Image (tube, helix red, strand yellow):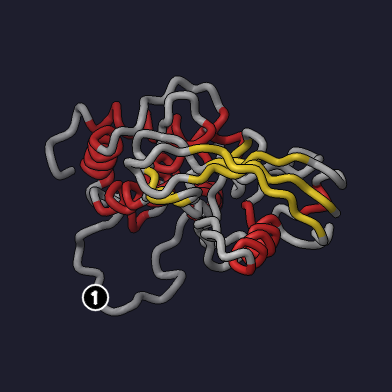
Amino acid sequence: MKITLNIWRQANAKAEGRLERYMLDGVSEDMSFLETLDLLNEQLTAENQEPVAFDHDCREGICGMCGVVINGAPHGRYSSSVPTTTCQLHMRSFADGAEITVEPWRAGGFPLIKDLVVDRSAFDRIIQAGGFISVNTGSAPEAHATPAPKLEADRAFDNATCIGCGACVAACPNGSAMLFTAAKITHLAMLPQGQPERYSRVKSMIAQHDAEGFGGCTNIGECASVCPKQIPLESIAQLNRDLMKSLFRREGK
């Protein structure tokens, strides 16, 4: 395959960015999109040019590091429009001779570092603000010592699959991280172990979300439509329910 890549290049957060055009030959349809960027960087290195900086790690659709916008869609899309991670997007999704535009996540809470790399540490701080329980758990309990109803357990598991990639933020016109925050809150809220500090947790995490510069949720739904782990939009409704209940409870409860 021959393809043309229009890639956002920016030396640092203060530098002026631009799209640069690269022609690439010898692309296999079985390559992932990240392998295609590897191929480009090998070509650039051989030509004594600066390679493109981009995030990656596991390359198995698990870690959430590989966040870029491909032709206007976070992580890109298969022809069937099934959400995926960038590392699991294969070049067979594109036609031979295709022209592809690649950009970084663009959101107030994700400041750009270089090229396609953004700082997503705001997600860590949201979790640190309340994504835990502070009770003394002692030694590891037997797995079935605290039973949980199947419906709640399934909802907890569904939300626990969030990989924190940030696609929801990149897709949201408001730059909101509400789906990510809702996944972390709902995961704990559905389990018996998550009941301590349940309502103070939601207030702390929402306050940190806003302090990081993410926008508010207006229920457009773009976040859920691009989520590679298909976190449901109803998780935001659960967050809102807990937030409303927290207003009528004493601090720390």
Q: Viewed as shown, does residue 197 lie left or right of 233? A: left
Question: Percent x, y for residue 205?
Answer: 27, 42
Instruction: Say which residue appears at 84% left-offset and 44% top-offset.
Output: 97
For the question of whether residue 243 can be seen, the reply is yes
Question: From this viewpoint, which residue is outermost toward the bottom?
Answer: 139
Instruction: Say which residue appears at 82% left-offset and 61% top-offset.
Output: 26
Looking at the image, which is closer to me, 181 or 249?
A: 181
Looking at the image, which is closer to me, 58 or 104?
A: 104
Residue 30: quadrant of the picture: bottom right
For the question of whether residue 157 can be seen, the reply is no
Label 1 sits on a secondary structure element that is: loop
Question: Percent x, y for residue 98?
Answer: 80, 41
Looking at the image, which is closer to me, 241 or 25?
A: 25
Q: Amino acid at mark 1?
A: Gly
Q: Report which residue position mark 1 lands on.
A: 138
Looking at the image, which is closer to me, 43 or 90?
A: 43
Q: Is residue 140 above or below residue 133?
A: below
Question: Percent x, y for residue 226?
Answer: 61, 38
Q: How many marks?
A: 1
**Quadrant where the N terminus lies?**
bottom right
Q: Viewed as shown, does residue 87 lie left or right of 25? A: left
Q: Viewed as shown, does residue 34 lie left or right of 115? A: right
Question: Percent x, y for residue 214?
Answer: 34, 33
Q: Residues within 10 Å of mark 1 (few under 14, many from 20)?
A: few
Instruction: Say which residue appears at 30% left-offset and 31% top-offset.
Output: 243
Q: Is residue 196 above or below residue 76?
A: below
Instruction: Say which residue appears at 50% left-offset and 29% top-offset.
Output: 172
Question: From this viewpoint, which residue is outermost toward the left?
Answer: 251
Residue 99: quadrant of the picture: top right
**Quadrant where the C terminus lies?**
top left
